Image (spheres, grey):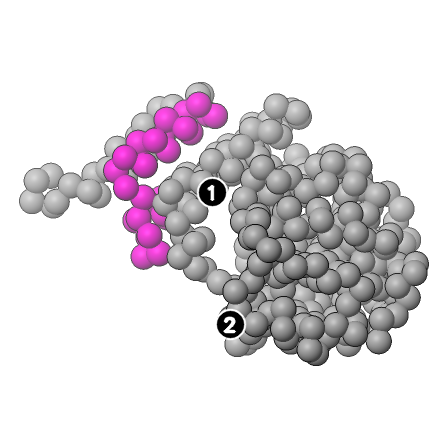
């Protein structure tokens, strides 16, 4: 049954592409929410599987807007914005099609934004799961942020958006899963909608743009389950340098707008170096000699003061391509 579609408090956007195998768990976890004041906007980006048929046959009665693209956009953030423009709610939940959640997700998250009018973005802790929905060694995203602060993400917190950017988000995207996020629609719109010129880091930069003019709140409870796919597409985005370009782009966007402590800038640079080391010789994919050289020049353009470190790192990386007998 479609509920509260005239003036829903929350607009739930499901942007799907070929995730039919996960859609029942995704949609069931939304329909079972204990907080009922929402609409569902389903956007399919020209799926070639049975996604559209499944939703029409089983869930159409629950969906307020059902839109199917005839041509794939190749960019999830285009779909985000399409959904937000259709949304009637005060709050936006971009519930990624392959994830799922606790039935109390909205019950816990909506009051946090309702009671904190300056907050433009709230998010909860997530648990990473495999393709079957099973927890991966109890791995929450606390592990992902542990090196930034081992205790911070174990407790609820509120922070100004600018401080969150200058202390944490400039180093890496500390909000790694959009399904864990509840946006205030007005803050999302005021930020200029999601960034569509980035394919992989568009969420990260969008969060930063929202937080440039609003606060952030975090709920320590695990209410979201993030389906983990370290796919060939993900690996290729690093080996072909697209993700590296986008990481550097986001960092430099922030460096140009704000003054940062040198320690923070060094940690941001180190994040880039760590990723480079990993993908220079990873089992998921290996950056070619030519692309390693291109990456070094790209990094020197963004971090000219670190050129000596970049050259040294390039030398180490390239040495791995030389057979041991010739060293």
Q: Position of residue 248 (x, y in %)?
A: 50, 34
Residue at 44%, 23% in the rendered image: 301
Extreme residue in the left direction: 325
Residue 326, above or below 42: above
In the image, what residue occupies the spot 19% across and 42% down? 321
Expressed as whole percent of the image width and height from the top left, the position of residue 103 reads: 76, 74
Residue sitting at x 84%, y 64%: 38
Q: Which of the pair 43/167 is nearer the observer?
A: 43
- The circle drawn on residue 279 is none
- Taking the image as shown, residue 241 lies to the left or right of residue 6, namely left
Task: Mark 2: give few (<14), some (14-19) or many (20+) Cα within 10 Å.
Answer: some
Q: Quadrant of the C terminus?
A: top left
Residue labelled with disc 1: 243
Can you give x and y, in whole percent of width and height, for residue 30 in the image? Answer: 74, 70
Identify the residue under disc 2: 131
Q: Which residues are magenta?
A: 277-303
The mark that comes first in sequence, 1 or 2, is 2
Q: Give the farthest residue toward the bottom.
A: 58
The relative height of residue 326 versus residue 220 in the rendered view (above or below) is above
Q: Main secondary structure of the magenta part?
A: helix
């Amino acid at each position: 049954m479609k509920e509260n579609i005239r003036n829903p408090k929350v607009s739930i956007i499901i942007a799907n592409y070929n995730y039919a195998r996960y859609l029942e768990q995704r949609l069931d976890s939304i329909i079972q929410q204990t907080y009922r004041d929402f609409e569902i906007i389903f956007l399919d980006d020209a799926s070639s599987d049975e996604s559209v048929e499944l939703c029409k046959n089983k869930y159409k009665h629950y969906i307020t807007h059902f839109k199917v693209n005839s041509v794939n956009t190749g960019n999830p953030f285009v779909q985000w914005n399409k959904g937000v423009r259709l949304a009637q709610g005060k709050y936006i939940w971009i519930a990624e099609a392959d994830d799922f959640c606790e039935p109390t997700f909205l019950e816990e998250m909506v009051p946090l934004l309702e009671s904190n009018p300056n907050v433009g973005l709230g998010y909860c802790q997530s648990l990473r799961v495999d393709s079957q929905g099973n927890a991966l060694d109890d791995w929450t995203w606390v592990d992902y942020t542990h090196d930034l602060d081992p205790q911070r993400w174990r407790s609820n917190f509120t922070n100004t958006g600018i401080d969150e950017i200058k202390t944490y988000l400039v180093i890496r995207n500390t909000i790694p899963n959009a399904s864990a996020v509840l946006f205030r629609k007005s803050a999302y719109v005021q930020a200029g909608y999601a960034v569509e010129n980035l394919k992989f880091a568009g969420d990260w930069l969008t969060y930063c743009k929202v937080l440039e003019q609003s606060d952030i709140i975090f709920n320590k409870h695990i209410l979201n389950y993030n389906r983990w796919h370290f796919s060939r597409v993900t690996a290729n985005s690093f080996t072909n340098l697209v993700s590296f370009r986008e990481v550097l782009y986001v960092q430099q966007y922030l460096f140009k707008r704000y003054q940062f402590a040198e320690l923070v800038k060094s940690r941001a640079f180190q994040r880039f170096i760590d990723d480079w080391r990993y993908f220079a010789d990873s089992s998921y994919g290996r950056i070619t000699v030519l692309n390693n050289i291109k990456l070094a020049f790209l990094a020197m353009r963004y971090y000219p003061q670190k050129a000596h470190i970049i050259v040294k790192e390039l030398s180490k990386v390239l040495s791995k391509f030389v057979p041991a007998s010739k060293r």
